Amino acid sequence: MRTTNARHIGILCSEDQPVFTAIARQLRDSGHTVQFFDPRSELSLNYVDDLNSLVNKQVFPVNLPALKYARKTGTPLWNNLVATIALSSRLIGLKALEAVGFRTPRIAFEKPEFEYVAKPFYIWHGDPELNGEGQFYQELISTKPVDYKYYAVNDGVRVQIAAKRVTSKLYGPKRFLNRVSPKPRLTRRLHTLVNRFDLQGVGVDFVKDDEDRFWAIDVNLAAGYRDSGLEPALCDSISASFFDR
């Protein structure tokens, strides 16, 4: 169904990202125009002026001036700028997870004696590495090589949650295993994270230890949402980002 309130929407994301490609198709079917922008390239301020909404799905430092300009000139961003900048820092992200009640591994700034995951400070500076070189070191929780990925999307009416199991990238290419029912305790804390940071979409990675305790190991505003089933919620969320602000 086509809308009489058509908008020009920009998406900071690779054009071949499957979930957001599907979302763009839905938005176009509703009458909107959608344009993808390479998140690793500088976004012209003139392009920002032509947009009714900018979906900051993936952000690199080169994009920050355009996001600041969008905020200044009133072009709605999907995830707010303060949260986008703050949660790009892995250390701030871990503190945010702790603040809403998630259990997080201990960290060190020199190589520890225990097994660890080496990480750069910022999400755009590379991937974690098992027992490698990093700017800080996060304790490796004793567990199977499986991550639990939780996603939260504010569709404009409510926050929808989905969860899945994937193989850990620390041990090889990531592979989808299955969707799982979100745990109520994790879901409540994820709701708190979304509300406290005024987020529209976020992913949080967990591992489960030998005592069935869940540990939050990363927060990700650039989540891919693959195999989550949240495409309709994401489409509604992006629409709400310009109609409700």
Image (spheres, grey):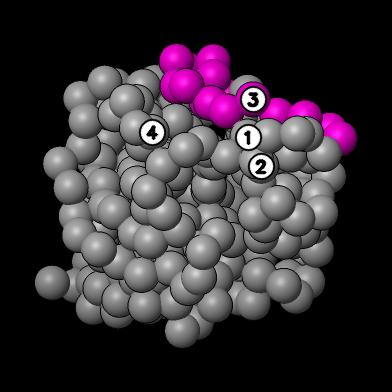
Question: How far apart in space, not on screen, are marks 3 and 2 (Cα)?
Answer: 10 Å
Secondary structure of the residue carrying numbered label 4 = loop
Quadrant where the N terminus lies? bottom left
Whole-percent x, y for residue 63 in the image: 74, 61
Secondary structure of the residue carrying numbered label 1 = strand
Tell me, yes or no, whether the two marked residues, 2 and 1, touch with CB atoms within 8 Å: yes
Mark 4 vs mark 3, foreground winner is 4
Q: Which residue is mark 4?
A: 209
Q: Residue at x 75, y 55 (%)?
A: 132
Q: Which residue is mark 2?
A: 116
Type of the residue with mark 3: Arg
Above or below, 199 relative to 32? above
Q: Nearer the viewer, residue 181 or 214?
A: 214
Type of the residue with mark 1: Glu
Question: How far apart in space, not on screen, are marks 4 and 3 (Cα)?
Answer: 14 Å
**Residue 106: image tag:** 3
Residue lying at the far bottom of the rendered structure: 16
Specify start and end residues of the magenta stretch as a single range.
Answer: 96-110
Tell me, yes or no, whether the two marked residues, 3 and 1, touch with CB atoms within 8 Å: yes
Type of the residue with mark 4: Asp
Is residue 216 visible from the viewing direction of this image? yes
